[in-house]
Image (cartoon, rainbow, N blue to C red):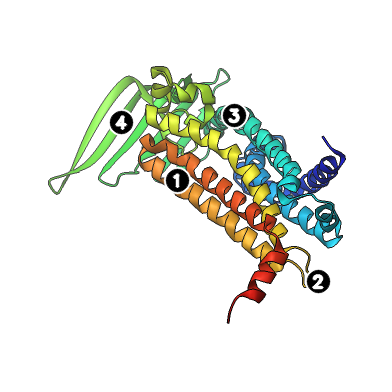
Amino acid sequence: MPRIDRYILSQMLTLFGFFALVLVSVYWINRAVSLFDDLLSDGQTALVVLEFTALTLPIVISVVLPVAAFTASAYGTNRLTGESELVAMQAAGLSPWRLARPVLVFGVFVGMLVAVLVHGLVPMARTRLAERQTEIAENVTAQFLRPGEFQYPAEGVTLFIRETASDGRLLDLFIEDARNPDDQTVYTSEEALVVRTETGPVLVLLRGMSQNLQWQHGQRRLSVTRFSEFSYDIGAMFAARDRRGRDLREYSTWRLLDPDQELLNATGGTAGEARREAHERIAQPLLSPIAAMIGFAVLLIGGFSRFGVWRQVIWAILLLILVQFLTNAAADQVGRDPGMWPLLYVPAAIGAMICLVLLWLAARPRPLRRRWRREKPA
C-alpha cells in the first residue's frame, strides 16, 4: 500500500477508535442503567448485572460501528481539508477516485468487524443471555417461596407458606389465583414440593383441596375438589420467562439460510422468517463502507472553504439518514413478506450509487464549470 494510502488509513482508524469508544460507552451505559434497575429490583447481585451488560456489549457494538465509521470519515476528511493536505494531494495529481481508495479500505475493514459480530459474537451472546435469563427467572421464582409471610408474585395471585422443612418440603401452603375475576381458585395443601422441569418450575401439591368459584349464567357456582397430588405451574405466575421458545437471532447464519424442522419447532418461526434473519445479517455489514464513503465524498465536493463545511456535513448526515430509512423500510416490508428478502440488499445498492455519483461530482473540473457559467449567454 502506498504511503499516502497508509497515512489516510491511519488517520481514519485513529479517529474511528476514538468515536467508537465514545459512542459505545454512551450507548452501553444507557443499556446498563435499565438492566441495573431491573436486575437489582429482582434481588440480583452486582456481578449478575455486570455479566448481563457484558453480554449486551456485542449487540451494542454492531449497531454503533457504522455510525462511528461515518463520523470518523467525515471528521477526518474535514481535518485533512482544513490543514490543506487534501488540497496538496489533489494538486499533486491525485483524483477523488484515487483518494477514495484508502477510505474504501477503511469502510471494508469496519464492515468485516460488523460481519464478525453479527455472524458470530452476537448470536453467541444472545444464546447465553437467554440461558441466563431462564436461570434468573427460576431464581426469582424461588425467592418468592419464603415461609411465614403473604407474598404477591403476580397481580391477582396470593401465596402463603407456613413453614419450610429441612428437606425442602413446603408445609401448609395456600395459593389464591384471582387473575380472572369470573374464575377464581384457591389451593390449599398440607405439603408441596418444587420440581424443576424443562418448561420451568412446577409446584407439586400433596394432600390438598382446590375451591373454584365461577360465574355461570349470572350465578356463582362453587366447586370443591380434593386431591392427593396436584401440579401447579408457578412459572406461569412470572412474566420473566418467555414461552415462545428460542429466538431466531440465537442461531448461526448457516442454519438460518437452510433451516431444519428442529430449528423451526424450537423457535416457532417459519423457513421464510429464518432466511430473512440470515439475509439481514448478510446485508448489515454492507452499510459500513457506504457510511464511510458518504462521509468522505460529500465533504470532498465542497473543497476548501474558510467558512467551514457545515453545509456539506448536513448533507452527509441527511444522505446517511436516507440510507438508514431505506434499510428500515426494506426490513419492515420483508418482515411482512419474508419472500421479498432481496429488498434487504437494495439500500446498500442505492447507497453505493450515491457514493459513485458524489465521487463523479467531486472529480469534475471546477475551472471548466466556472468558465461554462461565464460563457453561458444571458
- Residue at the location (54% across, 51% down)? 324
Q: Which dot marks residue 330?
A: 1
Residue at numbered disc 4: 210
Labels 3 and 2: the sequence-earlier one: 3
Residue at numbered disc 3: 119
Q: Residues within 10 Å of mark 1 (few under 14, many from 20)?
A: many
Which is closer to the viewer, label 4 or label 1?
1
Which is closer to the viewer, label 1 or label 2?
2
Which is closer to the viewer, label 4 or label 3?
3
Distance from the alpha carbon under mark 1 to that under mark 2: 40 Å
- The amino acid pointed to by label 4 is Ser
Is 22 left, or right, of 123 in this rendering? right
Which is closer to the viewer, label 2 or label 4?
2
Is 326 left, or right, of 89 in this rendering? left
Distance from the alpha carbon under mark 3 to that under mark 1: 20 Å
Residue at numbered disc 2: 306
102 or 120, nearer to the observer: 102
Labels 4 and 3: the sequence-earlier one: 3
